[in-house]
Amino acid sequence: MSATKILLVDDDPAVRAVPGLFLRKWGYDVIEAADGEQALQILQRERIGLVISDWVMPNLSGIDLCRKIRAGDSDHYTYLILCTTKGEKADLIEGMEAGADEFLVKPISKEEMKVRVRAGERVLKLERGLAERNRELRGINSQLQTAYARIEGDLKAAAWMQASLLPSPLRVSSTSSLNGCSDPPAMSRETSSTFSPWTIITSGFISWMCRDTVCPRPCCRSRSAACSTLRVPIARR
């Protein structure tokens, strides 16, 4: 695993030397900048997650550096630690409103700096984990949308195929009759009704089937004859 990169920003090289020495000893990859402007240029080229900056510097102060970093459109979070001789509550509030995450009061304590840096590492680790989970969720969501679209297309194709295999509807007049038999009561309507051809048995087929049977209805008690629309079983003698 590569060492965590830390950007150390201070206009005084002697002040940068001591914390830089400890950070390198702890295994961090330290990059130095002389002021806020130079720090911004480095951040545009390098993916750096943790910045330790002095508050008062020429060209671009530490607090203005914080504001510019927070106003940028970086694809990752940058943990900002401001070093200052200011210990007033109002100054700390101003720094936090500018986007600082932590503070180190000068003269910087080695142990305190180590604790602050490790706290920043934990935050950055959590941020990376959340970003990775978000990427996985976006990938899963994309796969689900593709699967749903495919299922919907298959269902539409199946419905079209099923509809093409069904027989066409047969329209039967409610007043039609054959051999003097009226339609069954269930079919008597003011208007014509549409039935499936599988529920209608024509007279020719029934006549052949009923050559030894008698129609059970009172209106038709003869052999070898059947109504044009027969929807009840033929009773054998």
Image: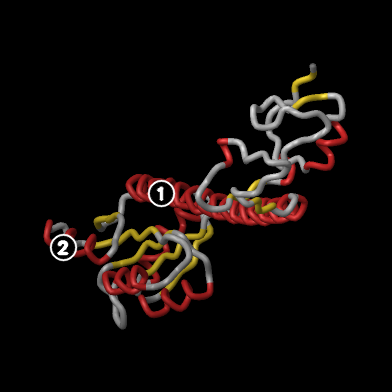
Tell me the element at label 2: helix
| Label 1 – label 2 distance at C-alpha | 24 Å
Q: Residue at x 48, y 65 (%)?
A: 75
Q: Is residue 25 visible?
A: no
State left or right for residue 40 relative to residue 225.
left
Whole-percent x and y of residue 73? 42, 71
Whole-percent x and y of residue 108? 30, 55
Q: Nearer the viewer, residue 114 or 129?
A: 129
Q: Residue at x 83, y 36 (%)?
A: 207
Mark 2 Cα within 10 Å, few/some/many (few <14, many 20+)?
few
Name the residue type under label 2.
Answer: Asp
Tell me the element at label 1: helix
* Residue 84 image-quadrant placement: bottom left
Whole-percent x and y of residue 136? 57, 50
* Residue that badge 1 annotates: 123
Height in image: 36 above or below 192?
Answer: below
* Residue 66 image-quadrant placement: bottom left
Furthest toward the bottom, the residue is 59
* Residue 115 image-quadrant placement: top left
Q: Nearer the viewer, residue 117 or 133?
A: 133
Height in image: 51 above or below 118?
Answer: below
State left or right for residue 133 relative to residue 12.
right
Name the residue type under label 1.
Answer: Val
* Residue that badge 2 annotates: 91
State left or right for residue 128 relative to residue 142.
left
Q: Nearer the viewer, residue 55 or 128?
A: 128
Which numbered dot is residue 7?
none
Whole-percent x and y of residue 182? 63, 40
Q: Nearer the viewer, residue 190 or 88?
A: 190
In front of the other: label 1 or label 2? 1
- The quadrant in which the C terminus is found is top right
